[in-house]
Image: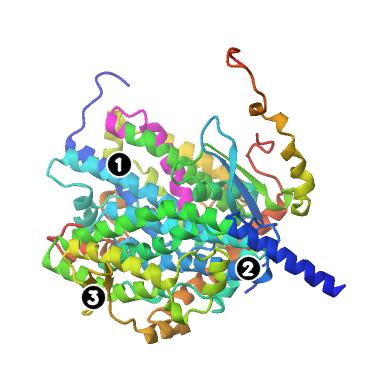
Amino acid sequence: MEAAAQLDESALEQRFLARVDAEEKIEPKDWMPARYRNTLIRQISQHAHSEIVGMLPEGNWITRAPTLKRKSILIAKVQDEGGHGAYLYSAAETLGVSRDQLVEQLLSGKAKYSSIFNYPTPTWADVGAIGWLVDGAAIMNQIPLCRCSYGPYARAMVRVCREESFHQRQGYDLMLHLAQGTAEQKLMAQEALNRWWWPALMMFGPSDANSTHTGDSQRWKIKRFSNDELRQKFVDFTVPQAKFLGLTVPDPLLRWNDSKQQHEFGPIDWNEFDQVLKGNGPCNAERIAARRNAHAAGAWVREAASAYAAKHSRAGAEHVDGR
Amino acid sequence: MEDKNQWPLYEVFVRARGGLDHKHVGSLHASDARMAIDHARDLYTRRQEGVSIWVVPSKAIVASDPTETDSLFEPARDKIYRHPTFYDIPDEVKTL
Amino acid sequence: MSAAAPQVGSEALFRYVLRLGDLSLVLGQRLGEWVGHSPALEEDLGLANIALDLIGQARMLLSYAGEIEGRGRDEDKLAYLREQGAYFNAILAEQPNGDFGQTIVRQVLIDAFQLELYERLAASHDERLAAIAAKSVKEVRYHLRYSSDWLVRLGDGTAESHARVQSALDLLWPYTVELFAADELDLAMADSGIGPRLPEVQSAWSARIEAILTEATLRRPADRPHAWHGKRGQHSEHLGYILAEMQYLQRTYPDARW
């Protein structure tokens, strides 16, 4: 019986791979290898956690935004990020895991999220740098994901990408105003670039040689380009943008290679990356504490809502017959 | 930190504008249907993407069994006479 | 309204519009503090949505106020560079967020007020105010739906949630007196057909609140007199901190554009 089952399993896997190769989308109830399912759960939930944690470094400037227009833009941006987290949790849940389980993993420290959000935003310029560089890097990662093999993830990414370009533009626009402003504003912008440049490059993950998950992810069309490819593309796009701002990229080894038609850049400090990943970054503890506190402080609210719903199972004043 | 009474999952369908069908856009958690409508409004229609929202508890969705895909959907494949392009109507005959 | 309705001076209209704008500004600012810290991800979005609407209302109203004043102050100069005594929001808006329940109580009380106010302002003799009110009333209707739904869930949820919102209601109730305490400015606006008569707003507000509190199984607190007058620039201790945070960048870099 077992041998027959194994044969079945391998035939199913072959059929699955053929579908992926043919660019067919895999949907929630389709057969998939357990490793594919688990890889996706890990990747999608990490992405979702990143959006949620990402609301904090920028959210902390909402009350101090320097104009009402900037305040509105920032609220809308952070709202979008929360929304992206929600789309992604929703996509992860189609794979058989619950939102509450995922949140539990984040708060207990078991789950990872993008290390970039463990850096502080001490000045207004950091808000601009995040929009320009962090969202810029995210876009580079996310556009290929719109074509990933898993249907719900691909569709969530299409929504996300549509909203993300506003995020990058508002960040760049913010930096432009600073770079063209007073001497103090220009200095603020340069210092923010100095702080965020290398962490943004690290967002693309370890170099290909040191990357553990890439092989499978590329076979299953979850990951369509390698870390180094995306990182190179990001550098090539972003350096001219910095030049236009009149700011200096903090890399003395950065130079244009004419024969390769791309920029060469200096070595990344992978030590720093590892430390931040391990939880020793400047804000790791703060970020998780903020999320834990929000979750704990809100427990009575969530319980009350459930208790109310249990007492009154009616749909309220909605048209229950809907259509 | 396990939550008592986790909020159930709802599937969300949005009609982008009059004349179109409601389309599935994703899911969300809410404690009741009214909250689900509010959440759907805040989550899926911020950019004027909707004029009408349906929310359905996920557990109410009945789906076709994917292992029966072949028997449910394959037979229609060779009944191409259901498609208008199967029929070769002479050019002289208009409005058919 | 009679054709011979008395005119109001621009100074009076300026102050009246600031009252409306500052209420939205300060309440929006308070809600901005919640982002990333709400009980659920969806509530982060819900509260952010209300904050965004309120800041939008503040922008329209402050811009208009600046035009009325005619001294070149735009929405940002008014929002960021006035000193405390020149803000005219009712002080209910500046009260602390407290827990989610307290925020919801404060929200219901003000949403119901803004709804009755804007519905009447949509018929204002001042065309600009009428237009702003007509746009804002739709937003505020949704705000009240959101906040009152939550108040009902919390009031009629668990024993703990009921106790929390009842005590928040008892705490914030005295600040509602100011919303309806008509002074010479309110009377002048009503006489000239620009603003509503506050007693009318009050009875409509009272009826709405009564219905919501009943459904929420909450007890309406006894009315108590309250002597604060944020409408006249006399504020609680809280506004100072709110402004210090809000105005920081503009005050620190006076020549900068953002």
Q: Is mark 2 in CB contact (under 8 Å) with mark 3?
A: no
Q: Are marks 2 and 1 on the same chain?
A: no
The residue positioned 31% from the left and 60% from the top of the image is C239
**Circle 2 SS class:** helix
Can you see residue C197?
A: no
The residue identified by callout 2 is A36
Q: Residue C195 colored magenta?
A: no
Q: Chain of mark 3?
A: A
Question: B22 or A101, which is in the foreground?
Answer: B22
Q: Residue C114 colored magenta?
A: yes
Q: Position of residue A31 (x, y in %)?
A: 71, 61
Q: Position of residue A97 (x, y in %)?
A: 65, 66
Instruction: For the N terminus of chain A, give its image quadrant.
Output: bottom right
Residue A176 in the image: above or below residue A39: above
Instruction: For the C terminus of chain A, give its image quadrant.
Output: top right
For marks 3 and 1, give the one nearer the viewer. Answer: 3
User: Which kind of residue does numbered mark 3 sit on?
Assistant: Leu
Q: Is mark 2 in CB contact (under 8 Å) with mark 1?
A: no
Q: Position of residue A276 (x, y in %)?
A: 42, 82
The residue identified by callout 3 is A254
Q: Is mark 3 in CB contact (under 8 Å) with mark 1?
A: no
